[in-house]
Image (tube, helix red, strand yellow):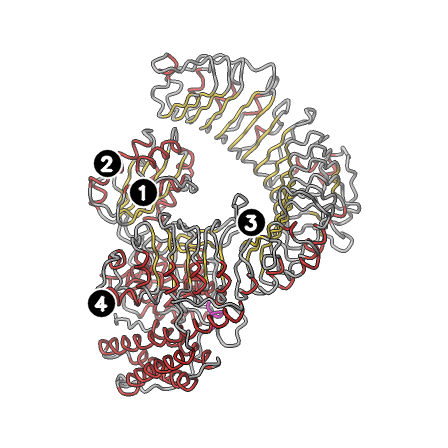
Amino acid sequence: MTEFLWTFAVQELLKKTVKLAAEQIGLAWGFKKELSKLKDSLLMAQAILRDVNRVKADLDSLKLWVKKLEDIIFEADILLDDLAYEDGRRRAESGNGVMVRSFFSFSKNPLAFRLKMANKITNVAKKLDELVFIKTPPRCVGTTSNEAEIDLNQVRETDSFLDEIGIIGRETEVSYIVDKLVVLPIVGTGGLGKTTLVKEVFHHDMVRKNFDIFIWVCVSHPFKINKILRAIRGSLNPTFGGSDEREVILQELQKLLSGKMYFLVLDDVWNEESILWNELQACLLKINQNKGNAIVVTNRSDKVAEIMETNDIHHLSQLPDDHCWSLFQKCAFGSNLPIIPDVIRGQLVKKFGGIPLVVKVLGGMVNSCKKDEGLQLTLENLVRIALPKEDLILSTIKLSIDRLPSSSLKQCFAYCSNFPPDFFFRKKELVLMWIAQGFIQLPNGSNVTMEDIGARYFDILLSHSLFQDIVKDNRGKMIGCKMHDHIHEVACAISNDQSLRRHLIMDGKSVGDEVLLICQRRRTVCCSESLPFDNQDTITNFIYLRVLIIRYRLITELSDTIAQLKHLKYLDISNSGISELPKSIGLLYNLQILKLRWDIKLPTTFTTLVNLRHLEFDFDYNNQIKEMSKHLSRMTQLQTLPDFIIGYDHGRKIEELGPLKDLKGKLSLFFLERVKSKQEAMAANLVEKENMSELNFAWSIEREECNGGDLNVLEALQPHKNLRSLSISYFAGQLLPNGVFVENLVEIQLWRCERCETLPMLGQLSKLKVLQMHSLSGVKSIGDEFYGNYCESRTLFPKLKRLYVWKMDNLEQWKEIAALSNCTTFPHLENLTIGVCLKLTSIPNILVTHSQKLEVDTGNAGLYSNLQSPPQLQSLSISCCKCLIKLPNWLEFCSSLEDLWIDNSRDDISPPNLQNMQNLSSLGLENFHNLPEGLDGIHNLKKLVVKGPMEGYDWSRFIPSNSLEVLELHETGTNSLTQIPRQLEHLTALRSLIIESFNDVESLPEWLGNITSLKTLKLSQCRNLNSLPSKEAMSNLTNLAVVRCSQLKMDEGGVEREKVSHVPYVWVE
């Protein structure tokens, strides 16, 4: 296979410097002639480089010429960046009306600066002309190209189903591994799918049933015990910020894992030293000695597996051809499978080599084809390309990179080499780093942002299978992903930064020319626990640094010398110990992205950062800082400002938001009571901020007085119609204005608006999916004002999926819709929660499609059989509604329900008949006088919780219930049962049983041993219980908890304790 000539970095650097030169010519500099000459030279270099890519002959000499060109363009880029810095300085000083120069400023004398810069520009242009015109490579004449930059919108966009493909052809191996769990190494070469296989095991139903805690640690290299232990601790308690000493970590893990059965995955282990493995095993035993714990280890070497001294080692083999083809089809075509000729199919399968990673990468290449004719050509080209079998994986990945649709994408991909293997790339952060490096340039006349283009780049790389292990938030939005080791290896191989070795950074005393030169060319530095700087002045060796990330809590101070990094565009100290920024931070005029801790103290020079686009931090009410820096309005490039703390002083009022027209994403406004008038609130100009997607309006939890101005302020904070999410907290007005609830809202939260008496009109919001109303104590009635104008709209709340009504203390009436003819309400509702509405008497018939008017209190249940019950409702919870007269009539016909919790707070309501609820998997019943009818006919029920007086219950309704896995019985009656219901022994799938407050039960029955599936038993507050069944009856138990059962003597060496001596975990309180 022909060796690749990677010129994309130089191509992009050239394109960027041409654009920068053109921008600088338009400014009022005194050296336009020199800049124009430099621009012409850069354009000629672009033309020659295009020829170099076409010729690709005499590869060694071409590489040398490209390297020389890269050095000159690097110099030009730095030079033009210096001019951009000077422009930022001038704008900052003129905007602030103050001088912020210091000994770091290079432009105290404007005349001397102009002469110096003119000479530098001329010298760079001469070097470029000599290389381009005199030392031009053979057959490269610099012809003008008519090729346009590819339109990325024409590249097929996918939802990246890679995280949902799962496994193909490994189902038998999954079952084998599940059966062999103790300590099991899984061995196989890179790319065979070890991690994918173990993920399937990790989420397997049998694994989830038999373990309490699930831990995933990506170990990689080096194998450091403390690092692994910290990772385990982090997965169990992400907020733990204690000591890094091993003893402290072990003590914390003992608390977290005490009495738990854990399933631990150590992924990508390279350690071949038995001493280290034995040391880790010793630590794990100190934490938890349960016999049923399981550890699965993935690695590439038999030697790694052998040092674990286990009986079983699972070797992963190549994937069979037919399974490879199925995987390829999923990666390339999704569910839209085209007809592929058998000849092409057979030749492609041979190229796969049985390696899933190769299949995914090649499938990703085909996935980018939009049209059928392009697909056919792509498949034929893939067949013709020769891929060496001895290096199949890396060659395939390189081919995929070479076929990316633009040099910008290739550069963004290569940039990932700056981070270690198994690094989790957060999408937003990575895109902002690409911007900081100058990899993303806006096309002329474009109305999109660099951030939009960067997000598009990320999605394209994802669709080419160059990322994996996708993580999304609860809204389905991409958070980030990882990169496979082999793909990361290729990124390192083609990156221009490959010569930078870690020890060169770590050695702060190294001053050799080679080290210094490498430092100066370095554009990204990430300082972490594994890569610390002992001396902060070392960082100033990286004079052309664009991205600086400090993720090390022991670094508590940022030196004034940070101002020497005048090319810095991305600074992240959010995970450091730095609590105050130095004044010199204001001299970083090129800075575009700044990520801070929530409690950081900002200097007065902060607002001179005129090019800042993204300022990220999270406000905390416990924070003592109750105001923002003054004059944020001067930072007119800001797009990200997550929180704004409103102040009283000039420069800290809400009007500072007015000029920030590019704000996007999320914005939270705190202390809105400090806004004194409607006019003052209107000055924030939220209605013009079309890119805002989420707004949170918050008044103070406790304030001295409510002067009645909240309504005026909220009306003046009218958002743009594009807003997707709105939250209002502690609003003290009596009425929520309808105008702020704009048409495109998807989510609304109303939180503790306790004086509000009327709900806003929300029923006609066509995109609303989530509505949460909490602690609206002033609302007494829900009626037509809430539903909206149903005379014009026949469907109310047409897209709502989740409705949450909680702690509406004075809510008495939830009215029916006045005219129900041919009106549909809540047709897509999936989750309904109604709780702590102490005065609510009835729940209306709003969740059905109505063809006729119904009376609120009709008792004719047969009438409901002619109506369409809630077709989508999956979860319903009704609790703590003490005045509720009856349950809604439609409930018994709700066949879609999967999760149901109901309590009988009034003590005179019968439980619903469950015969139509065949999909129920979780059921909670509280304070009913019997079990519901139809319980014995539910064959999918997994969990049942029963609380209440159980005397007189018909326990035969349990039979048959052979699907039940978790049962909780909480007796609350004064006449307690004297024995556990015998019908429980027929629950053949039961694995967890909780028995609480059975005060008249003195001994547990021997027939508990008939429930052979039972693993966990908890006995709580059974005050007369004094005897357990025999050891044989509890032979299958793995967990036993005894809590406040005073008569049950569980002392060590006692009779009852001896009965459970075989149980791995016993907890007595």
State the residue position of label 2: 311
Task: Kindly identify the residue that appears in the image at 40 percent across and 56 percent down.
Answer: 425
Q: Which residues are magenta?
A: 151-155
For marks 4 and 3 on the same chain, the one whose residue lies earlier in the sequence: 4
Residue 885's x, y, as percent?
73, 30
Viewer-side label of 2, 1: 1
Disc 3 element? loop
Q: Distance between the Cα atoms at labels 2 and 4? A: 54 Å
Q: Nearer the viewer, mark 3 or mark 1?
A: 3
Quadrant of image for the N terminus: bottom left
Kindly tell me whether residue 691 is visible in this rendering: yes
Q: What residue type is disc 4 on?
A: Asp
State the residue position of label 1. 228
Q: Residues within 10 Å of mark 1 (few under 14, many from 20)?
A: some
User: How would you rate the neighbour count of disc 3 (Cα within 10 Å): few for under 14, some for 14-19, many for 20 or more?
Assistant: some
* Location of mark 4 (residue): 513
- Residue lying at 79% horizontally and 45% vertically, measured from the top left: 818
C-alpha gap between disc 4 and disc 3? 49 Å
- Residue 843 figure quarter: top right
Most prominent secondary structure in the magenta stretch?
helix
In this figure, which residue is indicated by the disc labeled 3?
A: 626
Q: Quadrant of residue 936?
A: top right
Could you tell me the amino acid type at mark 2? Asn
The amino acid beneath tag 3 is Lys
Quote the CA–CA distance across marks 3 and 2.
Answer: 61 Å
Distance of label 2 from label 1 (alpha carbons): 24 Å
Mark 1–mark 4 Cα distance, whole angstroms, equals: 37 Å
